[in-house]
Image (cartoon, helix red, strand yellow):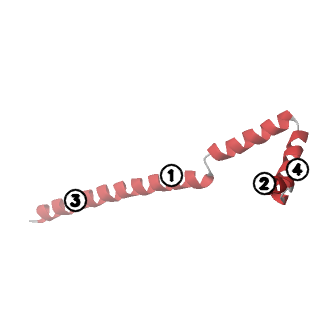
Amino acid sequence: MGKKDASSARIPVDQYRKQIGKQDYKKTRPMLKATRLKAEAKKTAAGIKEVSLVLAAILVFLLACYAFFYLNLSEEVDLDLDRDEN
């Protein structure tokens, strides 16, 4: 008997969900499809933040390589100048 009484009284959350479900049926099929496609595109699209982070990482890597080779070549030039003076 307790179960039968509990099932007859609806809680407000269930009523709210049922009302939302009725509203979804009022929308047209193309409208729902467009909303779904828009949400999927938003999930899969690369954001500006991700693109800028990748570009910044590549720039840092290139600058590090440049600095490494610059320092190595500048040391060799200094050694050559010292040998010519003797």
Q: Name the image quarter holding residue 39.
A: top right
**Which marked residue is nearer to the observer: mark 2 or mark 3?**
2
Element type where label 4 sits in the image: helix
Q: In the picture provided, is 59 more to the left or to the right than 65?
A: right
Measuring 16% from the left and 59% from the top, which residue is drawn there? 80
Q: Name the N-terminal-most of marks 4 and 2.
A: 2
Place of residue 32 in the rendered image (x, y in percent of width and height, measured from the top left): 81, 39
Q: Is residue 46 above or below residue 86?
A: above
3D distance between C-alphas at marks 1 and 4? 45 Å
Place of residue 81 in the rendered image (x, y in percent of width and height, measured from the top left): 18, 62
Crowding at mark 4 (Cα within 10 Å: few <14, some 14-19, many 20+): few
Amino acid type, label 4: Gln
Place of residue 86 in the rendered image (x, y in percent of width and height, measured from the top left): 8, 65
Label 2 belongs to which residue? Answer: 3
The dot on residue 34 is none
3D distance between C-alphas at marks 4 and 2? 24 Å
3D distance between C-alphas at marks 2 and 3? 91 Å
Q: In the picture provided, is 24 more to the left or to the right than 77?
A: right
Q: Name the N-terminal-most of marks 1 and 4.
A: 4
Crowding at mark 2 (Cα within 10 Å: few <14, some 14-19, many 20+): few
Measuring 37% from the left and 58% from the top, which residue is drawn there? 64
The dot on residue 54 is 1
